[in-house]
Image: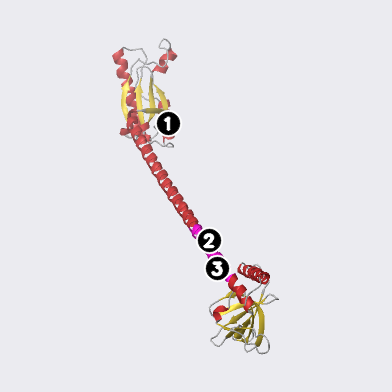
Amino acid sequence: MRISRPRLAGLLALAFVFVLTSSVGALAQNQAQTVLNGQQLKIQGIVIKRHADSFRVRDINNVETVVALTPATVVRTHRKGIFGGGKTYAVSYILRGLRLQVEGVGNADGQLVANLVKFDEQDLRAAQALQATLDPVEDLAKSNQARITAAEQNEQKLAGQIQENTALANQAQASANQAQATADAAMKSATIANNRINGLDDYDPVRTLTVYFKPGSAVLLLTAKQAIDGGAAWVKTQNTKGWVVEVVGFADSSGNTAYNRSLSERRANAVIGYMVSKHNLPLQRLVQPFGYGESKPASDNTTAAGRAKNRRVEIRVLVNKGIAGTTD
């Protein structure tokens, strides 16, 4: 039986549109029909999906029914006339796009178990033509989808590798920064230690206390003791790490040079004796005392007031930069 060209074109167009719209879910309003168990039913429509043992039919009202095939299912064409018998086909001839009629009974799964499937041979030819057209297109679509999926997976894999490499780079940078910080701290400690060693002979003055004596005398006056007591009380409130005490004696120009030097040394020793005996000054805090005599006068020796200022002992509190850790 030959199909007229206009009819074939119409059937192909109808089936093609129907199959494509069902494949992309464009007709989301379609309703699925559940056939009651044991229900006798006859439906008519177009095959939109085909599986090994079943197919899905959509009728003119867009109601879809799942049809189950069994070994007892009869597949044939419609009878022609009163005496014309239909031609029998295998179930494999049930193709997508085929317009057909199904008679059967419902099962427990809500499917229609087909007893009889009938169709027109012209509709079969149209479905076969449609199948030949769609198969290459679908194969190409599946191939493209596989390539797209592979590309997406590669892109995700590459993104993961970039993220991992970025994390490794950040970790390496953090380790480098930590190493640099450790090196900087070590260098700073070494520099401080070196400066402290170099600063063992480097002193800064903290405070100078001056006490005065009578002419030709190395005896501490009451005012001198009171001044020393006040200085000792102040020292106890301070952090004395690295502190030393330098005691230096002086004299006016009334005697000769040798006498004045000896007198200035005795004056220095008198002050040291008082600080050790009265205030328990540790001897290791003392710098070797010295007497300058009349040299390095604090004032003019030509006047009585000036000579009074020169008969003195200077108690100098110094801090060792290296020990105190104050070197830069």
How far from the left and from the top, in percent, is residue 14? 66, 70
Q: Which residue is mark 3?
A: 135
Q: Nearer the viewer, mark 1 or mark 2?
A: 2
Circle number at residue 231: 1
Q: Disc 1 versus disc 3: distance between alpha carbons? A: 110 Å
Q: Is label 1 in contact with label 2 (beta carbons under 8 Å)?
A: no
Which of the pair 235/8 is nearer the observer?
A: 8
Q: Is residue 8 visible?
A: yes
Residue in view at x 60 percent, y 81 percent: 67
At label 1, counting other C-alpha atoms closer than 10 Å, the crowd grade (few under 14, some 14-19, many 20 or more) is some
Residue 139: image x %, image y %?
Answer: 53, 65
Amino acid residing under circle 2? Asn
In terms of secondary structure, where does tag 3 sit?
A: helix
Which of the 4 image quadrants contains residue 269? top left
Whole-angstrom CA distance, mark 2 to mark 3, is 14 Å
Q: Residue at x 39, y 28 (%)?
A: 204
Position of 289 with respect to 111 (left or right) is left
Q: Where does the magenta region start and end? A: 130-153
Name the side, left or right, on which 95 lies relative to 183: right
Question: Which label's residue is closer to the chain start, 1 or 2?
Answer: 2
Residue 53 in the magenta stretch? The answer is: no
Question: In which quadrant of the rendered image does the C terminus lie?
Answer: top left
Tell which of 318 and 135 is nearer to you. 135
The x, y position of residue 32, in whole percent, is: 65, 77
> To which residue does mark 2 refer?
144
